């Protein structure tokens, strides 16, 4: 019995070590894109040369989720399920992404921020918190500068506010590179223009090379409460840039999620949801 017990305990210890090692490397994984719940109410808005797709879930005070570049709103599937228990959750496919269309104009963050404001007008939402990931986080911060009266607060995860904040080898990493590669199939499955992912990706990467371009002085004018968040293993955004944003925005809080990367909301939904709960319940 003693030998069995020792063997059992040793096995448990080995499993614990293996689990800890796996958990410690969540940052190095790229989980599949989630799905959105089936009970949403979809809508389309013709705005400024594009048709913008959005969907609403749940009931209660509104919260707007903005996805990253090359992605679509399904990347928020885990968070929609969590937040829709006590919020009206609005997801928006940025112009040219997912189910939304675009015209021939170059992508700009200010143009996409104006699309979000237009969706809010359509849904008669005067003010709401915005949760943004990557490009969506940039859009949220641009809205804080251009439309402060429309926002109650901003949770900006993995944002850069000038091109120097991006790591030059981003697209060559297994996670971000894998995300960009699998984007073609995700794009073709729902886009109104399937088969055009290569040109879409080229246009987005051109924007990434040249935008955004906001100074510390610009950031210092933000009056909306902001949380600057990121994973401590982000393969796309420089840690010093994240800290610079938190220093430059008056009153901003810095939230670093341990053991996670640019894709934290996929890698550890519970940890990400907990950060969102703290953000939304803050006074």
Image (tube, rainbow, N blue to C red):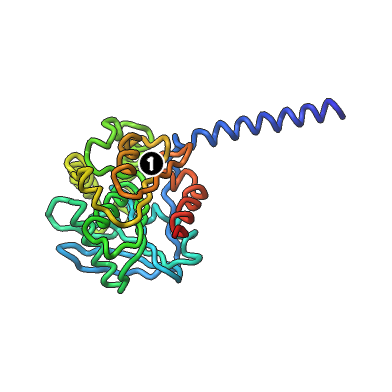
Percent across and percent down for residue 72 are 33, 54
Residue ID at (64%, 33%): 16
Quarter of the figure with the N terminus: top right
Query: How many other residues sit within 10 Å of disc 1, few (<14), some (14-19) or many (≥20)?
Result: many
Looking at the rendered structure, the number of numbered marks drawn on it comes to: 1
The answer, for residue 188, to whether it is visible in the render is: yes
Q: Nearer the viewer, residue 170 or 216?
A: 216
- Residue for badge 1: 262
Which type of secondary structure does the marked residue at label 1 adopt?
loop
Residue 64 lies in quadrant: bottom left
Residue 205 lies in quadrant: top left
Residue ID at (73%, 27%): 10
Task: Note whether 97 is above or below 198 in the view shown.
Answer: below
Q: Which residue lies furthest to the bottom in this view?
A: 124
Looking at the image, residue 184 sits to the left or right of residue 86; the answer is left
Residue ID at (38%, 41%): 262
Percent across and percent down for residue 169 are 29, 30
Looking at the image, residue 2 sits to the left or right of residue 72; the answer is right
Q: Residue furthest right?
A: 1
Q: Nearer the viewer, residue 114 or 27?
A: 114
Residue ID at (29%, 60%): 99
Looking at the image, residue 6 sits to the left or right of residue 262; the answer is right
Percent across and percent down for residue 238 are 32, 34
């Amino acid at each position: 019995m003693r030998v069995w017990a020792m063997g059992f305990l040793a096995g448990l210890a080995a499993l614990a070590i293996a689990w800890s090692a796996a958990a410690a490397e969540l940052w190095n994984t790229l989980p599949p894109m989630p799905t959105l719940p089936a009970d949403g109410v979809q809508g389309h808005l013709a705005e400024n040369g594009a048709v913008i797709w959005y969907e609403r879930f749940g009931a209660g005070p509104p919260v707007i989720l903005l996805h990253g570049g090359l992605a679509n709103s399904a990347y928020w599937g885990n968070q929609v399920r969590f937040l829709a228990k006590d919020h009206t959750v609005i997801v928006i496919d940025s112009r040219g992404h997912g189910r939304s269309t675009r015209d021939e104009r170059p992508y700009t963050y200010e143009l996409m921020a104006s699309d979000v404001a237009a969706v809010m007008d359509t849904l008669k939402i005067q003010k709401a918190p915005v949760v943004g990931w990557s490009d969506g986080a940039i859009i949220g911060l641009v809205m804080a500068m251009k439309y402060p009266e429309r926002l109650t607060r901003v949770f900006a995860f993995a944002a850069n506010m000038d091109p120097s904040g991006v790591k030059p080898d981003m697209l060559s990493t297994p996670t971000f590179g894998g995300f960009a590669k699998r984007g073609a199939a995700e794009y073709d499955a729902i886009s109104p223009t399937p088969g055009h992912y290569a040109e879409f990706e080229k246009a987005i990467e051109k924007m990434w090379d040249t935008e955004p371009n906001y100074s510390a002085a610009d950031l210092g004018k933000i009056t909306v409460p902001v949380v600057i968040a990121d994973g401590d293993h982000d393969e796309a955004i420089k840690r010093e840039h994240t800290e610079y944003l938190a220093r430059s925005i008056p009153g901003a809080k810095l939230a670093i999620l341990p053991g996670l990367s640019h894709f934290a909301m996929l890698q550890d939904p519970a940890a990400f949801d907990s950060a969102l709960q703290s953000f939304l319940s803050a006074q």
